[in-house]
Image (tube, coloured by chain):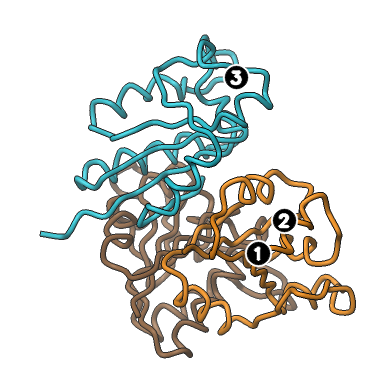
Amino acid sequence: MILHTINKSPQHSAISACLRIIGKGSAILLIEDGVYAAISPSPFHNQLCDLKIYALEADIKARGLSDKVLPGIETVDYQGFVALTAQYDSVQSWF
Amino acid sequence: MMNPKSFLIINRHSPYQTNSAKEALDVALMTAVFNQKTSVLFMDDGIYQLLKKQDPTDITQKNSAATFPMLEMYDVDAVYVEQASLEARNLNEQDLLMPVQVIDSESLRELIENQTIILNF
Amino acid sequence: MIFSLAIYGAPYASQAPDTAYQFANAVIASGHKIHRIFFYMDGVQNATKLASPPQDEADIPARWSRFILDHQIDAVVCIAAALRRGVINEEEANRYDKPSSNLAEGFTLSGLGQLVEAGIESDRLVTFGY
């Protein structure tokens, strides 16, 4: 099971590429501009709902999104990021 | 001796505008030098790296495509191209400069879950 | 657990070096080990000692230098990627007859094999893309 990090906004191809191939039991961590996917019911939102989604708290706060994060998305700090990378078998970065 | 790990190098960016294509290929060749099981996957705009008839002379760059035959020389196990990315770009296998394995998203999911190390470029 | 980091983004051009820096600190704070930090592609710009950002901005290269020395981390800059982008140590500057060098303290220039080795030798290789 893989932790997929995404650092681009949902309009970018990174998130759709990741969603095409992500396997069951794997998870997504939204970082940097990736956190914009945490607020918008994008075309991918339905699929996002079936997956475990995390978002990096510092990037959410930096971008003014703290009050807008959709339910079901769990925020983590940098130590939480490290814990997730340890929890999953490997990390794949989409950028 | 270190145990071989499997590496998958994923190319998602077009050639020339950035140096990504060239530097990703260097990584693929290096994993093969280390005798690791190496596969290379092209998806999204990375597919444009494989188009025939590239000639970047007039933009004063080297033809990044010229190095692709090295993948075979270095015993890279497989070169995959994602079918959905080809279709989305109105391209097919005949447009590509080397033989590849066209792979659908479901098989790709399996492939990716079975790699030890995935390096995205 | 043993971690290695690969950083592909340049400071002030990409957030990658900032995220990677916070992540690296959190790895140490969580009691894990860092086997190597590998700087590749535009990420080699993190290793210049000549960056002079305004005082109210983070000095990203200097911050890496301190972190690497404080924690005795193997920080490798891909030599081919670095030389083509003007990041160079004294030895290479002499070899290529360049007027000066700029590789910051703590960083080493070495081959791309060090990235592959880091992948093989670490439990986790985490990439910070541009």
Which of the two marks, 3 or 1, is nearer to us in this view? 1
Mark 1: amino acid: Leu
Residue B68 versus residue B96 in the image, above or below: below
Q: Which chain letter matches label 2? A: A
Asked whether the residues under the numbered discs 1 and 2 touch, taking CB atoms below 8 Å apart as contact, a structural biologist would say yes
Tell me which chain appears orange.
A
Residue drawn at the location 45% of the way across and 49% of the way down: B112
Residue A93 versus residue A61 in the image, above or below: above
Left or right side of C76 for A43:
right
For the N terminus of chain C, give its image quadrant: bottom left
Q: Which chain letter matches label 1? A: A
| Tint applied to chain C in the drawing | brown
Q: Position of residue C47 (x, y in %)?
A: 47, 63
Of residue C39 and residue B98, the one placed in the foreground of this image is B98
Quadrant hosting residue A41: bottom right
| Residue linked to disc 3 | B59
Left or right side of B48 for B7:
left
Mark 3: amino acid: Ile
| Residue linked to disc 2 | A47
| Tint applied to chain B in the drawing | cyan
Task: Tell me the SS state at disc 2.
Answer: helix
Q: Which chain letter matches label 3? A: B
Q: Position of residue B121 (x, y in %)?
A: 51, 45
Mark 2: amino acid: Gln
Residue drawn at the location 80% of the way across and 78% of the way down: A61
Left or right side of A41 for A25:
left
Give the CA separation, mark 2 to mark 3.
41 Å
Residue B64 versus residue C7 in the image, above or below: above
Which of the two marks, 2 or 3, is nearer to us in this view? 2
Task: Tell me the SS state at disc 3.
Answer: helix
| Residue linked to disc 1 | A51
